[in-house]
Image (tube, grey):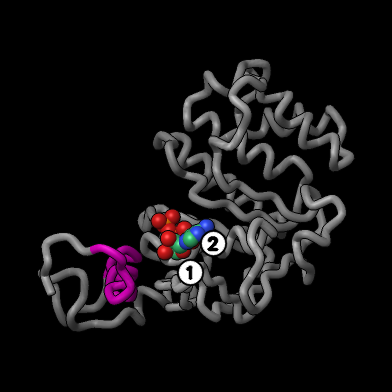
């Protein structure tokens, strides 16, 4: 495992008139879990796609280990990513899916077996992915991300579809991977989970950086006054969810109830 950093510098992605990512800059350091959060449509997935070379920036840079993803020769060894757990051929078995990935990255069969064990899928290795639950697909996606023992992990909503045991497992796994010196970037809408998992948080809204700080600082420095907790205006935030809702109040795409 070679440690690496993620660097996003003045990153911008425009889709016609829509600016999905707007001069965004942040760094994800090794040895910690960085939560990547923001309301629907904030630009999280677009940023991750730019980091993984799946889309080209309009301006700015998205670098992993100081390089663009596309220029990395054997990317699974440097960057592990989970984008869409359903993007696996349903007719393939779990082990065949990993074999297919391993082949182009010079990874041997022993590593496939140990990775399937690590994610709890050893017993289902030969089962068709089409018959997997969403939680099992998430685990397979995480196996694919871990396969090359990368120093950087980028996971988009890895807790999606997981039961409480699965969520706890992800939390422990992310902590352990960071403790080994990896840089872990994790997006999620589950603020209660983020409070438990993340060391730092990068919050974006409408493509722009809203905050880049520790969970503790975010809670103690969240704005008071009018916020997303109308029952407690003027009071300090007491949880990450509370702080997050206050900070992103102006950046939400759709609002129910017409309270403004
Ligand atoms: N391929 C595309 N073409 C046009 N617009 C796009 C494309 N991809 C994303 N967008 C737009 O960019 C903006 C950011 O979307 P993105 O999916 O990155 O947000 P997100 O923070 O991941 O949202 P969510 O939390 O809902 O997953 C949205 O307005 C979205 O409609």
Residue segment shown in magenta: 238-254
Q: Is ligand 1 within 8 Å of the beta carbon of the residue shown at mark 2? A: yes
The reply to whether the magenta stretch includes residue 58 is no
Label placed on residue 20: 1
Q: Is residue 218 above or below residue 46?
A: below
The CA distance from mark 1 to mark 2 is 7 Å
Q: Is ligand 1 within 8 Å of the beta carbon of the residue shown at mark 1? A: yes
Q: Do tag 1 and tag 2 residues touch (Cβ < 8 Å)?
A: yes
Is disc 2 surrounded by few (<14), some (14 to 19) or many (20+) residues within 10 Å? Answer: many
Image coordinates for residue 75, horizontal then vertical, percent: 79, 52
Is disc 1 surrounded by few (<14), some (14 to 19) or many (20+) residues within 10 Å? Answer: many
183 horizontally vs 74: left or right = left
The quarter of the displayed image where residue 186 is located: bottom right
Q: Nearer the viewer, residue 58 or 209?
A: 58
Residue that appears at 40% across and 72% down: 205
Q: Is residue 105 above or below residue 224?
A: above
Q: Is residue 16 visible?
A: yes
Q: Which residue is mark 2?
A: 46
230 horizontally vs 222: left or right = left
Q: What is the tally of numbered marks visible in this picture?
A: 2
Which element carries disc 2, helix, strand or loop? helix
Residue that appears at 73% across and 24% down: 96
Image coordinates for residue 248, horizontal then vertical, percent: 33, 72
């Amino acid at each position: 495992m070679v440690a690496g950093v993620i660097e996003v510098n003045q990153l911008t992605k425009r889709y016609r008139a829509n600016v999905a990512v707007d001069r965004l800059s942040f760094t994800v350091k090794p040895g910690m879990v960085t939560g990547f959060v923001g309301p629907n449509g904030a630009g999280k997935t677009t940023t991750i796609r730019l980091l993984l070379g799946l889309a080209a920036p309009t301006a700015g840079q998205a670098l992993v280990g100081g390089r663009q993803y596309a220029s990395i020769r054997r990317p699974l060894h440097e960057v592990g990513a989970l984008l869409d757990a359903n993007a696996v051929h349903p007719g393939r078995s779990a082990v065949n899916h990993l074999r297919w990935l391993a082949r182009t990255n010079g990874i041997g069969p022993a590593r496939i077996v140990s990775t399937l064990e690590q994610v709890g899928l050893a017993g289902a290795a030969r089962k068709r992915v089409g018959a997997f639950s969403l939680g099992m697909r998430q685990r397979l996606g995480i196996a694919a991300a871990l396969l090359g023992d990368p120093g950087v992990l980028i996971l988009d909503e890895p807790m999606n579809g997981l039961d409480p045991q699965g969520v706890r497992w992800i939390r422990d796994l992310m902590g352990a991977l960071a403790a080994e010196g990896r840089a872990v970037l994790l997006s999620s809408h589950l603020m209660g989970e983020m409070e438990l998992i993340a060391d730092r948080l990068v919050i974006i809204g409408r493509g722009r950086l809203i905050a880049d700080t520790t969970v503790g600082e975010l809670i103690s420095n969240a704005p008071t006054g009018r916020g997303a907790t109308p029952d407690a205006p003027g009071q300090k935030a007491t949880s990450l969810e509370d702080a997050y809702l206050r900070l992103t109040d102006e950046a939400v795409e759709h609002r129910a109830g017409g309270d403004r």
